Amino acid sequence: MVDLVSQYEKIKPSIDAAIQDVITKAQFINGPEVQGFQEELENYLQVKHVIPCANGTDALQMAMMGLGLQPGDEVITPSFTYIATTEVIALLGLTPIFVEVDPLSFCIDPNAVKAAITPKTKAIVPVHLYGQAANMEAIMSIADEHELFVIEDNAQAIGCDYRYTTGARVKTGTIGHVGCTSFFPSKNLGCYGDGGAMMTNDDQLAQTLRRIANHGQTKRYYHDTVGCNSRLDSLQAAVLRVKLRQLDSYIDARQNLANAYDEAFAGLAGVSIPVRSNHSNHVFHQYTLQVPPQSRDALQTFLNDKEIPSMIYYPIPAHRQKMFASFDLASTNLSVTDFLTERVISLPMHTEMQPDQLAYICSTVQSFF
Ligand SMILES: *Cc1c(COP(=O)(O)O)cnc(C)c1O
């Protein structure tokens, strides 16, 4: 699905030097690389504060802690997402309220959010799924009206440009009260292990999030609140500094690949290519087709036999996971989510696709249909 080896080969001298430098200086935890990366990412995203942490799941958890969400509070989230988004809600004793996604963008449906609000609702977690943005303008206006927090799950969309109806552009992850991202190796900005970050423009909240990520510590060995040990290590920060400089060209490569796929698959009967949203550009963390449910397994087997990887993101939506069996989900009826779950299939998407590989994937998919 990705080719991180070829990608590394192209930036090997810079990466190797950066890693060697960390080891030579032995500043493995909170070294200058972490501070440097934080500032460079703030600058890239045009956001006041980036708080690096250990992974994207921690980022989501700590965002909810930092906003003061309390057990029993309801958090509105799409069911059609990676499990981490929803898992941390339950982990903190909050109540996940699973809502529908928009069938075209795969992102949370603002009308469904509105309909799910109760007096217990405290937050909304839009997910910028596959690399394009949820309708943040609508979500922020609902949040304003009902005094709710918005936590953006930007793990799949770092670098994505949100477009306001006025034409103004900002990076996704900087619009809600907190944005969360992941630097898992296969993400658009991936390190060589686990990593993550929170983003916010709120000075006070940034301080709180930083404290939570560091054992609730205000001053060395003074712990004011219960926190976590969630740090981005210096080696990963050093890798990320090199890769952040490539992020825009990596996004270009993904978009070019998506355009080529679009051209190859647009005319295939029964196949839907990804819809490009009006709310943002698409940074193509995933390139996801919809195919008739009765042929999806056969397509996957066919591709597999021809040594072409493919993935189903995600075969079981959150509201159908056993993890949430203790919640009352009897009235949760998400027909769009179920519809998409049966139809989606993602193809290899990365920065290093060679023309012969692309041609082979395209002709193989075409020959199946
Ligand atoms: C990857 C991902 C996460 C979790 O990130 P980790 O760094 O793996 O913990 C959360 N949400 C979404 C949508 C993701 O794709």
Image: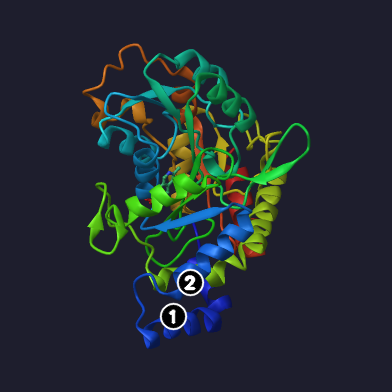
Residue 269 appears left or right of 2 = right
On screen, residue 72 above or below 65: above
Tell me the residue at 27%/52% (across/down): 228
Label 2 – label 1 distance at C-alpha: 7 Å
Tell me the residue at 47%/31% (across/down): 149
Q: For the residue labelled by badge 2, is the local secondary structure a helix, a strand or a loop?
A: helix
The quarter of the picture where residue 70 lies is top left
Q: How is the image coloured?
A: rainbow
Query: Residue flagged by tag 2: what amino acid is it?
Result: Val
Query: In which quadrant of the rendered image does the C terminus lie?
Result: top right
- The residue at which mark 2 appears reads as 239
Depth check: give the residue in front, 276 or 189: 189
Instruction: Find residue 214 and report its horizontal and vertical position in percent.
Output: 31, 57
Depth check: give the residue in front, 42 or 278: 42
Q: Which numbered circle lies on residue 84?
A: none
Q: For the residue labelled by badge 1, is the local secondary structure a helix, a strand or a loop?
A: helix
Query: Residue flagged by tag 1: what amino acid is it?
Result: Ile
Q: Is residue 307 visible?
A: no
Depth check: give the residue in front, 330 or 95: 95
Mark 2: few, some, or many residues within 10 Å (few <14, many ≥20)?
many
Tell me the residue at 35%/53% (across/down): 211
- The residue at which mark 1 appears reads as 19
Instruction: Find residue 148 and report its horizontal and vertical position in percent.
Output: 47, 26
Mark 1: few, some, or many residues within 10 Å (few <14, many ≥20)?
some
Tell me the residue at 49%/13% (across/down): 115
Instruction: Find residue 106 and report its horizontal and vertical position in percent.
Output: 55, 32
Q: Is mark 2 within 8 Å of ligand 1?
A: no
Residue 137 appears left or right of 62 = right
Task: Count how many numbered circles sit on residues in the image.
Answer: 2
Q: Is residue 219 visible?
A: yes
Instruction: Find residue 109 and report its horizontal and vertical position in percent.
Output: 55, 23
**Dots 2 and 1: beta carbons under 8 Å?**
yes
